[in-house]
Structure formats: structure tokens, C-alpha cells
Image: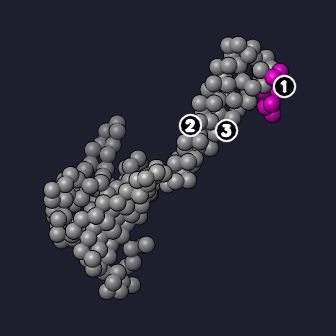
Amino acid sequence: MANPTATEQSPRQESILRYSVLGSRRPSNYFWAVVVSIGGLGFFLAGLSSYLHVNLLPIGNPLDLVFIPQGIAIGFYGVAALLLATYLWLAIAWDIGGGFNEFNKETGFVRIFRWGFPGKHRQIEVSCPLSDVQAVKIVIKEGLNPKRALYLKIKGRGDIPLTRVGAPLPLAELETQGATIASFLGVPIEGL
């Protein structure tokens, strides 16, 4: 649900703040899944071609490869890449890490929801009363491995992450989202 502007908000919308969290359906994951799939298929077919002595590839000539050791090695790399591609496509299909953060004044609860891997605990949900929220914490670490994240500081619990895993959010978006949540909940911001 998009956050409506102040002129469009009804009383119900003013009491609920909800942010979507992007999971594994990021453009970079689609890119790498396609690249690894194509590369893995190419390597697998090259190894298979060297074994069967039939060219299965539209480009190149894998018939010049000796099956032992070159064909086996290339075939092994192809199988490994295809297994990795399968994992990437399944993670995209299952939208691992996707979900939402909902702050609801009507019910008086914060609800953090994420999708996990299939199984008994596929739906990961954390809920706590709004009164237990102590602060919104912003963590910014620049350098080789930058980190920009929002956390909810809860009484009696550890900090609960609100932002996606992976590519850090732009600084302006992080600060705006943190300020909006803190203002909505009436709690301070830590870390700035």
C-alpha cells in the first residue's frame, strides 16, 4: 500500500503506516540468475558434447575437448552453475526476505512480516505493542562494505531490522523513512 499524501488520507489511513520491503525480487538477482543460467547451460553442454562427440552448442567447437580431464571439469562447472541458478530462481519465485512493516494505531501493534524459505516457518512475523517501542535506530556505516539500516528498538527484545538485506537504501530515503516512523510512533531517533 503506497503512503498517501496528507490531502488524500482518511482517518483510517492516518492511523496505519505501512512500508513494503523488497526481498529477493531485486533486478540484480534477476540479472545474475539469467547470467548463471546461460553460463551453466553452456558449460554443461560443452562437457556433454565432449563426451558424446556431438556438437550441442551453436557457437564454438567443444568436440576439440578431451573428455578426461577437460570435458569432465567443464561439465562439473556447468552442473554447479545450474544448481546455483536453480537456487537463485527459486529464491526469486519464493520472494525470500520480502514483506512489510506495519505500524497500526487502531490495534496498537507493530507488525513486521517477511517471507522465508518454504517449510513450517515460511511466514516470519514479529508483533509487539506500540507502547514497547523505545526508539527508531539508524545505523550508517560507510566504506568498503557500506551499511545503512533502520532498526526498531523494543523493550525487552533486541533491535528489529526494518530495512531490506542487500543493497543499502539511499541516505535521503533512509532518513526520511526513519523520521516518518519516529514521528508517527512519537519516539526519538537514535544514531544521527
Q: Can residue 180 be seen in this view?
A: no
Q: Which residue is at 59% across, 42% downward? A: 86
Q: How is the image coloured?
A: one colour
Please name the amino acid that badge 2 sits on.
Leu
**Could you say which is closer to the camera, residue 65 or residue 142?**
65
Please name the amino acid that badge 1 sits on.
Val
* Measured Cα–Cα span from mark 3 to mark 2: 12 Å
Horizontal placement of 134 versus 152: left or right? left
Horizontal placement of 36 versus 161: left or right? right
Residue 44 in percent (x, y) is at 69, 29
- Of helix, strand and loop, which one carries label 3? helix
Q: Is residue 142 visible?
A: yes
Specify the label residue 54 is tagged with. 1
Which residue is under mark 2?
84
Above or below residue 100? Residue 13 is: below
Q: Which of marks 2 and 1 is nearer the N terminus?
A: 1
Residue 134 in percent (x, y) is at 15, 62
Q: Do the residues labelled 1 and 3 touch (CB within 8 Å)?
A: no
Residue 113 in percent (x, y) is at 37, 61
Which residue is under mark 3?
38
Q: Which residue is at 24% across, 65% downward? A: 128
* Measured Cα–Cα span from mark 1 to mark 3: 20 Å
Task: Tell me the quarter of the image containing the N terminus.
Answer: bottom left
